[in-house]
Amino acid sequence: MKKFMMMLAALATSLGLSGCGYNDMAQGEETIKAAWSEVLNQYQRRADLVPNLVATVKGYAAQEQDTLTKVVEARAKATSIQATPELINDPEAFKKFQAAQNELKGSLSRLLAVAENYPNLKSDALFRDLTAQLEGTENRITVARNRYIKSIQGYNNAVVSFPSNLVAMVFGFKKKEQFAVENEAAIKSAPTVDFNKPAAPAPAAPAKP
């Protein structure tokens, strides 16, 4: 194996590192790290909004304890995973991280849906500000994820394509993890809540006999 790697190294050197994509892959790795860092920053921004959002909802809808608890638990799970730059090199860890983030997004969507039933909560200034921040953060997450996806495409192609794959093998460039199709579907299908809509009227009480 050692002899084989030495031969590959010699071949890569003879072909020319820049011509075989070494520089492109090295630069690509730095671009990917920066893009992934921004994804993590936006996920953290969302997590930071959760405690105040839960506390505000609890002030008006304490009876929705099950929904509130699930949001808190989902946040704890999402933030318990060590989100290091190396995460994108570990398929299993990446998959668990994304599952936890999707679970948090889903629980937040359910919490906002529940808030529709509480007109006083919907009109609370702090709640409206928090939901506006959350909406903005979700948009930032989408933008950051798209940048990461684009930054990774050319790099991954170079890692598996000849002859740049020889350089990748010698110098340890490996494919980076990409967002799975099912994750994208889950995000696109998550319910949205429009807090500008008027609250639905409460059902009329049954007439007394």
Image (tube, grey):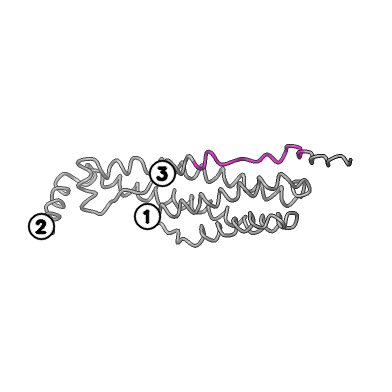
Residue 124: x and y in percent read 76, 50
Q: Position of residue 72 (x, y in %)?
A: 60, 59
Q: Distance of mark 3 from mark 2, alpha carbons?
A: 37 Å
Image: magenta residue range: 186-200
In the image shown, does 119 or 133 lie closer to the viewer?
Answer: 119
Q: CA distance from mark 3 to mark 1?
A: 12 Å
Dots 3, 2 in contact, CB < 8 A: no
Q: CA distance from mark 1 to mark 2?
A: 31 Å
Residue sitting at x 30%, y 47%:
25
Q: Nearer the viewer, mark 1 or mark 2?
A: 1
Q: What is the three-letter code of the residue carrying label 2?
A: Lys
Give the vertical position of 194 relative to 175 (above or below).
Answer: above
Q: Which residue is mark 2?
A: 3
Q: Is residue 168 left or right of residue 70?
A: left
Q: As shown in the figure, which amino acid type bears the numbered disc 3?
A: Ala
Q: Is residue 189 magenta?
A: yes
Query: For this view, does 123 lie left or right of residue 188?
Result: right
Give residue 15's position: percent from left, percent from top. Answer: 16, 44
Q: Residues within 10 Å of mark 3 (few under 14, many from 20)?
A: few
Quadrant where the C terminus sits is top right
Q: Which residue is mark 3?
A: 180
Mark 2 secondary-structure assignment: helix
Q: Earlier in the sequence, mark 3 or mark 2?
A: 2
List the residue tagged with mark 1.
92
Between discs 3 and 1, the one toward the N terminus: 1
Instruction: Give the residue type at disc 1.
Output: Glu
Find residue 26 and name its label: none
Q: Is residue 38 or residue 89 the one in the foreground?
A: 89
Q: Secondary structure at mark 3?
A: loop
Residue found at the very far front of the displayed protein: 209
Q: Is residue 45 left or right of residue 185?
A: right
